[in-house]
Image (cartoon, coloured by chain):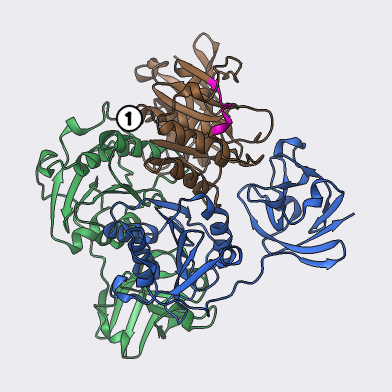
Chain colours: A brown, B green, C blue
């Protein structure tokens, strides 16, 4: 089993070529597209997607991530082992939310005999990450790919910061297709929200209502809901909260408890 | 064999997560994407897509449809058995065109032991529909999922209405990527169109020409053609009839015979 | 193994239906989407995509291409055998870049017993190309499909033309998702660019710098780079060269050596 996460879109030949490379090495590989619509060069968005998805896949799944603005430069290809699964991609933050959450081993991938030659300077998805992922999916031992390293890119924390006795500042992590604003407040870390009055400020709007499902409110009303990933989301019933509030990824979110 | 139809788009982790859930239950499942680009919350569009596609799939195929504005509310998850295939999704009209056309058995899905726990209130695609579909694809007997019901949502008719001795009022069911306007006039129900003069009014335009293939007319000319689904379509050669006529889904279509 | 390349998009039922047809004939077929986002009716774009991708697939792969503005008219369905692989689609130029590059045998597909009946006039992807591709993937001998022909559509050359002793006029073949302008100058045919001063004019801009990887320049700077397909590309670091230069597919590119 092998998943792909890239910013290649579906209009070019890049994704198809990676699949061809994988299937030539391992004709029995099961390939699942996580997403190829990651915004161009946005390693943070790729990190979020992977972190929401990996736990639903079987042990030994190989996740290949290619959002790689530094392709061809000195940044290293890495293999992360975590949660019984493998993560293959550039050392640029694409695995940061998994590294923050799981025990992990990181290797620099240096074993060129598993690469597609000649290795280009512009498409390591084809020449390095796809073939390495395919070999792993066939059972190659991680140690064959390169040595363990400790100087990989350390993840910045994705958690909200306490800014008052009963106040925290967080951020919008992601806006989904429906316009839901997914914050970095995890419901497990802020359980009071279920039982006590609160205020969540996003843009100019103060949201004070927590609902349990989307259809509970009238159309267009904004509310907070515990999303399927465990993060609090600011949503609107059958409408885009992102449009209503005029907010984007990275916008600050203030939470206050009463 | 298992197909997926959703309004999730391909930019989020939702579709990948559903596939992970399915493959963990049934690693040998063949998953085919029908479409994930259904307009958000548009159960009618999902109903149309499924109705055009199911008959081309093998017996016992499981079709999972997740266009589900009422997720988490009282609307029930259902299993429809029709045409030797299975249809799994919310009881909100997504299967209405199949129910109208085929003999069917409908069950309310209540057997929680096949769900992914804890069941969220916002992502039943992951927690109910994907795992239930996966178990069906492994051979689970439908009766294990829940009791037969009769009070499911009845489909509204999708057929044109006779409004004069030789006149009918129908509607645009769907606009495809090429801008073809797919009407609800089925060529089998209106055979005179092949041999007798007719007028089809869409928007402000009167179309009177029937052609047998797209390249028969000059660029930009509008005409009627029997589409690949059997419905009459208003089309233009290598141009978007939808743009030329300024019409959208649901717009009325008048057909008159002479 | 079977790949699909179409201009159907992912919002309609067309692609899903083709996959259903294929899997009913060959339930063990591995289907890979090359792209369904080819611009509507753009056989040149499909030709480019296929030519960049086929060599990465295993021998005997069947490539099905359906970009087919003439569907239902007199244009013939063809089977091309080249590079140990099969190419199935309309005789309208979709395989032109492969025919230009590889030794080939071309057959007109006439064996109606492998078609899905009744054959529509609007969806040969479903009725001819998908079933024929599926039968080939199961091992059907090409000769069973029809006779060899010589009067297929001859490809126009995709190569630059010499217009001065040290000057050539080429064109933009394709713009990828990142806004890179892929020219028809192949690095193997213009090796001097690696070692000697040159000017490449695209739109109003003169580009004189060759870099080896994208991150070598500051943001927004334009440069020439040998792309992963071997063609010279005009690119900008983490920005769209297409937007900066205001150029589209087909725009002329002048190369001068000093």
Total marks shown come to: 1
* Residue occupying the far top of the picture: A165
Q: Could you say which is closer to the camera, residue C136 or residue A42?
A: C136
Q: Between residues A132 and B85, which one lies in front from this camera angle? A: A132
| Quarter of the image with the C terminus of chain B in it | bottom left
Badge 1, how many Cα within 10 Å: few under 14, some, many 20+? some
Q: Position of residue A232 (x, y in %)?
A: 43, 26
Q: In the image, A203: left or right of B114?
A: right
Q: Position of residue C56 (x, y in %)?
A: 52, 49
In the picture shown, does residue C19 fall above or below C96? Answer: above
Q: Image point 39% across, 31% down: which residue? A: A61
Residues shaded magenta: A107-113
Tell me if C139 is positioned left or right of C4 in this view.
left
- Which residue sits furthest right? C258
Q: Is residue C242 above or below residue C144?
A: above
Q: Is residue B200 visible?
A: yes
Magenta stretch holds residue C234: no
The residue at the point 47 percent across, 17 percent down is: A104
Q: Is residue B151 or residue A119 the one in the foreground?
A: A119
Numbered disc 1: secondary structure: loop
Residue C78: x %, y % from top left: 45, 72
Where does residue A46 sit, x and y in percent of width and height? 52, 33
Q: Residue at x 36, y 59 (%)?
A: C13
Quarter location, residue A247: top right
The quadrant holding residue B188 is bottom left
Residue tagged by mark 1?
A212
Residue sitting nearer the eye, B68 or B214: B214
Q: Please say whether residue A204 is visible from this viewpoint.
A: no
Chain letter of mark 1 equals A
In the image, residue A35 sits, relative to residue A161, either above or below, namely: below
């Amino acid at each position: 089993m092998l998943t792909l996460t890239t910013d290649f879109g579906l209009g070019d030949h890049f994704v198809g070529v990676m699949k061809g490379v994988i299937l030539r090495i391992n004709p029995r590989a099961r390939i699942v597209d996580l997403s190829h619509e990651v915004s161009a060069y946005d390693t943070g968005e790729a990190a979020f997607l992977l972190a929401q998805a990996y736990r639903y896949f079987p042990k030994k799944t190989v996740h290949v991530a290619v959002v790689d603005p530094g392709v061809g430069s000195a940044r290293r290809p890495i293999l992360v082992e975590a949660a019984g699964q493998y993560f293959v991609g550039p050392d640029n933050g694409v695995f940061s939310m998994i590294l923050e959450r799981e025990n992990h081993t990181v290797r620099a991938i240096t074993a060129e005999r598993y690469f597609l030659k000649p290795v280009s300077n512009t498409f390591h998805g084809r020449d390095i990450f796809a073939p390495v992922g395919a070999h792993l999916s066939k059972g190659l031992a991680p140690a064959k790919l390169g040595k363990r390293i400790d100087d990989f890119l350390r993840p910045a924390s994705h958690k909200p910061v306490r800014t008052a006795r009963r106040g925290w500042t967080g951020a919008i992590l992601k806006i989904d297709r429906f316009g839901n604003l997914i914050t970095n407040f995890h419901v497990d870390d802020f359980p009071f929200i279920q039982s006590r009055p609160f205020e969540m400020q996003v843009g100019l709007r103060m949201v004070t209502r927590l609902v349990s499902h989307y259809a509970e409110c009238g159309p267009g009303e904004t509310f907070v809901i515990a999303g399927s990933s465990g993060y609090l989301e600011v949503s609107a019933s059958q409408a885009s909260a992102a449009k209503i509030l005029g907010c984007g990824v990275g916008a600050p979110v203030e939470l206050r408890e009463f």
